[in-house]
Image: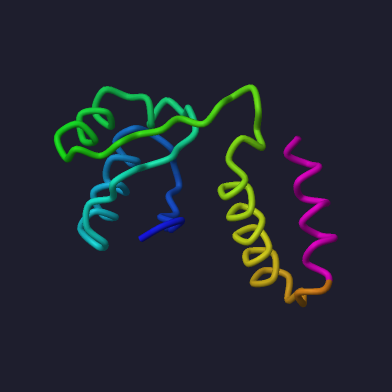
Amino acid sequence: MTRFACLYPEKDASSKIELKSATNFIEDFGLPILIISDRGSYFTSYDFQRLCDENRILHSLNSTSHLQGNEMVQRSHKIILCTIIMSIDNTDQKDCNSKNMEVEKKFK
């Protein structure tokens, strides 16, 4: 698989939960060659690094100084956000981009 994203919604973000999600991904889809992630503490934890090392998974961390460093992730986030907005708000695709921009401004 290339450029494949999978979501595992969780109520909390911790290294234990992230490890569970990564394990679920591996069980569902097999071992990835590469994981690209942000520098969140759960991705930089010893346990996550050990999971990658034990399974010979390359782990690449995005640059924190340049948010557009990984355009694929940014596009995925936009699609995910649009999908969530449309499912909650009964918004059609045409209005989604304007609502997406409103939501993005709130998080900046």
Residue 30 or residue 100, whichever sits in front: 30
Residue lying at the far left of the rendered structure: 54
**Along the horizontal axis of the image, is 49 left or right of 74?**
left
Tell me which segment is drawn in magenta. 95-108
Q: Position of residue 96 (x, y in %)?
A: 78, 66
| Looking at the image, residue 62 lies above or below residue 85 | above
Q: Is residue 53 magenta?
A: no
**Along the horizontal axis of the image, is 51 left or right of 34?**
left
Our reading of the magenta stretch's main secondary structure is: helix
* Residue 97 visible at all: yes
Q: Position of residue 74 (x, y in %)?
A: 63, 47
Q: Residue placed at 25% from the left, 63% from the top?
A: 28
| Looking at the image, residue 47 lies above or below residue 70 | above
Residue 16 or residue 29, whichever sits in front: 29
| Looking at the image, residue 96 lies above or below residue 9 | below
Residue 77 or residue 75, whichever sits in front: 75
* Residue 5 visible at all: no
Q: Position of residue 20 (x, y in %)?
A: 27, 45
Q: Residue placed at 60% from the left, 60% from the top?
A: 80
